[in-house]
Image (cartoon, grey):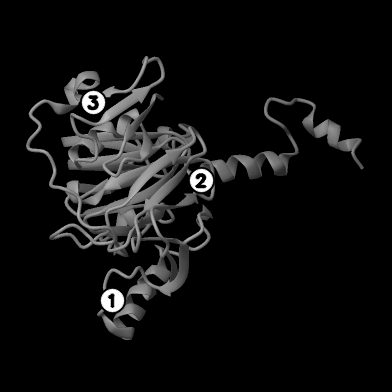
Amino acid sequence: MKTWHYHSASGSQASTSEENLAELVEGGIITPATLVWTAGMAGWEAASGVLPDLFKGAGAPPPPLPPSGAAPSGRRSHEIDYEIIGESIQMVEIELDPRETVIAEAGAMNYMEDGIVFETKMGDGSTPDSGFMGKLMAVGKRALTGESIFMTHFTNQGQGKKRVTFAAPYPGTVVPVDLSVHGGELMCEKGAFLCAALGTQVGVAFNRKLGAGLFGGEGFILQRLNGDGLAFVHAGGTVVRKELKGEKLFVDTGCIVAFTKGINYDIQRSGSLKSMVFGGEGLFLATLQGHGTVWLQSMPFSRLAHRITSMYSSGKGEGSVLGGIGNLFGD
């Protein structure tokens, strides 16, 4: 998949996959005047000349950036810049202005520059005035997803811009999502959340449909992200983004990464009894229908782990007929 590089509003260089360009344009991160470059181009060019289809019917340019460390007027989330590093096993490098903060799951940090201070706190810091009991209830819900009740807050306490990088726990793709252009809410699978701008609320949502809860790869509990800033989720393998306009999409239950408001999630049988037993696609399929955006992953962690453990338990390598026989001489 083609990677595009662009100059962010702060003057730093960032990169993204081609499928995320439309979302960056919607969020005002890439404007017609933004300089972009990809492999095969002789040099940097304005986005309007290279990607004209993305700016058809574009409105007025975004408002000027606020002072460093402050959220834009009317926004509650800090405005951060980022760069996606890597192609298939990705990391995200967050650039923080002085006093800006990014929150992340415990243990996700890969490296950071001098001047960034991190602190482990109870909760995401989106409601600092909620009091101890309010925070306790919020983190109690997070514990139901199997996540830690603590989150790490990384703040630039130095002079000038500083960077901190986060890596996902297994091979895959980092997906940037601007919550402000998706209705302020994103539903994602357990464990998909990686990091987000301070002000993003990381909670849970209970699936009210019995079938989806019992047989869906997501279970009864999903992660819910609320806010108006950037959030980053992780997907296994390659990511496919689908825009639904009332259509129904049938998906393997483990391949859903995230979906926006307006998408209804349910479960149904995968065809006839014969297909369910011998088809190899599982007994149930997830159905997604409505108006919104859906992100799908090609390699769910559960599928990857099952393949590795099954090969290990059988003592065979991929395509190896003599794998089991070879183990006889290993003792």
Q: Nearer the viewer, residue 300 or 277?
A: 300
Question: Which one is earlier in the sequence, the residue at label 1 or at label 2?
Answer: 1
Which mark, residue 128?
1
Asked whether the beta carbons under mark 3 and mark 1 sit within 8 Å of each other, the answer is no
Residue neighbourhood size for the residue with mark 3, other residues' Cα within 10 Å, grouped as few (<14), some (14–19), many (≥20): many
Q: Secondary structure at mark 3?
A: helix
Residue neighbourhood size for the residue with mark 1, other residues' Cα within 10 Å, grouped as few (<14), some (14–19), many (≥20): few
**Where, by quadrant of the figure, is residue 36 drawn?**
top left
Residue 100 can be seen, yes or no:
yes
Asked whether the beta carbons under mark 2 and mark 3 sit within 8 Å of each other, the answer is no
Q: Position of residue 146 (x, y in %)?
A: 46, 65
Question: Which one is earlier in the sequence, the residue at label 2 or at label 3?
Answer: 3
Which residue occupies 41% across, 25% down? 1
Residue neighbourhood size for the residue with mark 2, other residues' Cα within 10 Å, grouped as few (<14), some (14–19), many (≥20): some
Query: Foreground mark, 3 or 1?
Result: 3
Three-letter code, disc 2: Phe
Q: CA distance from mark 3 to mark 1?
A: 40 Å
Q: Position of residue 89 (x, y in %)?
A: 52, 38
The vertical placement of 294 against 261, above or below, is above
Query: Foreground mark, 1 or 2?
Result: 1
Find disc 2 in the rendering and name its residue.
301
Query: Foreground mark, 2 or 3?
Result: 3
Q: Secondary structure at mark 2?
A: helix
Three-letter code, disc 3: Ala
Q: CA distance from mark 2 to mark 3?
A: 36 Å
The vertical placement of 221 against 180, above or below, is below
Find disc 3 in the rendering and name its residue.
47
Side of 112 relative to 178 (left or right) = right
Three-letter code, disc 1: Pro
Asked whether the beta carbons under mark 1 and mark 2 sit within 8 Å of each other, the answer is no
**Looking at the figure, which quarter contains the C terminus?**
top right
